[in-house]
């Protein structure tokens, strides 16, 4: 895993009363990495691409502490007609602490209904991921 990686800075406000990163913040970290993936691989900001997050699943293994270095690794295992599944490994100091899976669905900006992944994006993802 890990054809794409994004470094995340843990902020003090991410820490909960237990002394580790709050579980809800993991979704924000994954979103931040996904946004960077779109910027670097598709050369577009996620806000400029007509998509919606259809699903997100997180599995926690260990807590993240304030002083740890966090990296999110992303892979796209396949592409659907309009859906883009992504898998994530959340690493703290190089050790896996969580995994996640999400699905982005591309939309027609006028009808807001699922539409095929634009060919230029499909080509860039396929080249980057080796699909």
Image (cartoon, rainbow, N blue to C red):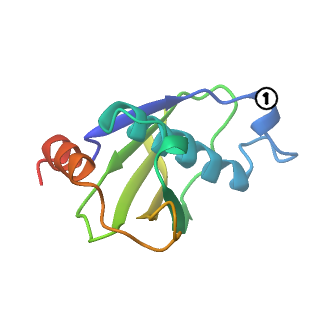
Residue 44 screen position, x and y as percent:
41, 36
**Number of numbered discs on residues:** 1
The image shows residue 29, relative to residue 93, as above or below, that is below
Q: Considering the image in quadrants, where does the C terminus appear? A: bottom left
**What is the residue that sits farthest to the front in this orientation?**
110
- Looking at this view, is 58 or 82 the one in front? 82
What residue do we see at 28% from left, 55% from top?
A: 118
Residue 24 falls in image quadrant: bottom right
Residue 27 screen position, x and y as percent:
62, 53
Residue 82 falls in image quadrant: bottom left
Question: Does the rendering let one see residue 91?
Answer: no
What residue do we see at 56% from left, 40% from top?
A: 32
Q: Which residue is mark 1?
A: 12
The image shows residue 17, relative to residue 51, as above or below, that is above
- Looking at this view, is 41 or 61 the one in front? 41
- Looking at this view, is 4 or 71 the one in front? 4
Apparent side of residue 102 relative to residue 1 in the rendered image (left or right): right
Apparent side of residue 32 relative to residue 12 in the rendered image (left or right): left
Please tell me whether mark 1 sits on a helix, a strand or a loop. helix
What residue do we see at 50% from left, 60% from top?
A: 109
The image shows residue 12, relative to residue 86, as above or below, that is above
> Tag 1: Cα neighbours inside 10 Å, few (<14), some, or many (≥20)?
few
Apparent side of residue 18 relative to residue 44 in the rendered image (left or right): right
Apparent side of residue 4 relative to residue 28 in the rendered image (left or right): left
Residue 46 screen position, x and y as percent:
50, 43
What residue do we see at 48% from left, 36% from top?
A: 45
Residue 3 screen position, x and y as percent:
25, 41
- Looking at this view, is 66 or 72 the one in front? 72
Question: Does the rendering let one see residue 88?
Answer: yes
The image shows residue 44, relative to residue 118, as above or below, that is above
């Amino acid at each position: 895993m890990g054809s794409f990686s994004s470094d995340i800075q843990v902020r003090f406000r991410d820490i909960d009363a237990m002394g580790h990163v709050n579980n809800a913040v993991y979704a924000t970290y994954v979103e931040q990495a996904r946004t960077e993936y779109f910027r670097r691989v598709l050369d577009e900001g996620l806000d400029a691409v007509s998509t919606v997050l259809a699903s997100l699943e997180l599995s926690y293994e260990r807590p993240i502490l304030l002083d740890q270095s966090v990296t999110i690794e992303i892979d796209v295992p396949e592409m659907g007609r309009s859906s883009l599944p992504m898998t994530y490994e959340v690493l703290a100091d190089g050790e896996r602490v969580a995994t996640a899976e999400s699905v982005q669905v591309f939309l027609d900006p006028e009808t807001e209904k699922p539409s095929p992944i634009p060919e230029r994006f499909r080509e860039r993802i396929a080249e980057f991921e080796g699909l």
